[in-house]
Image (spheres, rainbow, N blue to C red):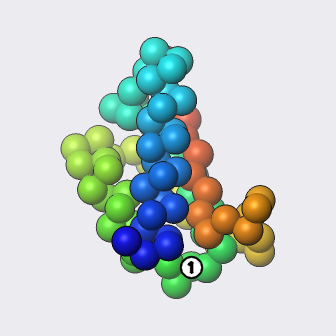
């Protein structure tokens, strides 16, 4: 996996773990915010994203930011029902 794909997958797994700990699931996600440090990485991130959210397609926004904590290449946050 490329760095952006690996980071995207890990970020989505982290979101899933937080949701499961709260008694929710990825099927209950209603909105996702994606922050990329380079919008040229969108296509690669989107491949991982599309595979992760096979049937559930929550609303999403994606923006390029100047810098992420710890110089990460992507950060993904989600809003879900519990």
In the visual, does 20 lie left or right of 78? left
Task: Provide the residue designation for mark 1.
Answer: 39
Asked whether residue 28 appears in the rendered view, the answer is yes
Pick whichever, 41 or 6, lies toward us: 6
Extreme-left residue of the structure: 55
Which residue shows up at 45% across the image and 35% down it? 16
In the visual, does 52 lie left or right of 31? left
Which residue shows up at 48% across the image and 52% down it? 10
Which element is circle 1 on?
Answer: helix
Pick whichever, 45 or 29, lies toward us: 45
| Percent coordinates x, y for residue 7 in the rendering | 51, 62
Asked whether residue 45 appears in the rendered view, the answer is no
| Percent coordinates x, y for residue 17 in the rendering | 48, 32
In the visual, does 63 lie left or right of 14? right
Q: In the rendered view, would you say 34 is above or below 21?
A: below
| Percent coordinates x, y for residue 13 in the rendering | 44, 43
Which residue shows up at 51% across the image and 39% down it? 15
């Amino acid at each position: 996996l490329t760095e952006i794909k690996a980071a995207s997958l890990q970020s989505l797994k982290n979101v899933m773990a937080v949701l499961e700990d709260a008694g929710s699931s990825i099927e209950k996600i209603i909105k996702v915010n994606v922050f990329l440090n380079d919008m040229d990485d969108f296509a690669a991130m989107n491949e991982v994203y599309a595979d992760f959210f096979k049937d559930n397609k929550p609303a999403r926004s994606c923006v390029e930011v100047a810098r992420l904590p710890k110089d990460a290449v992507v950060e993904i946050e989600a809003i879900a029902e519990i």
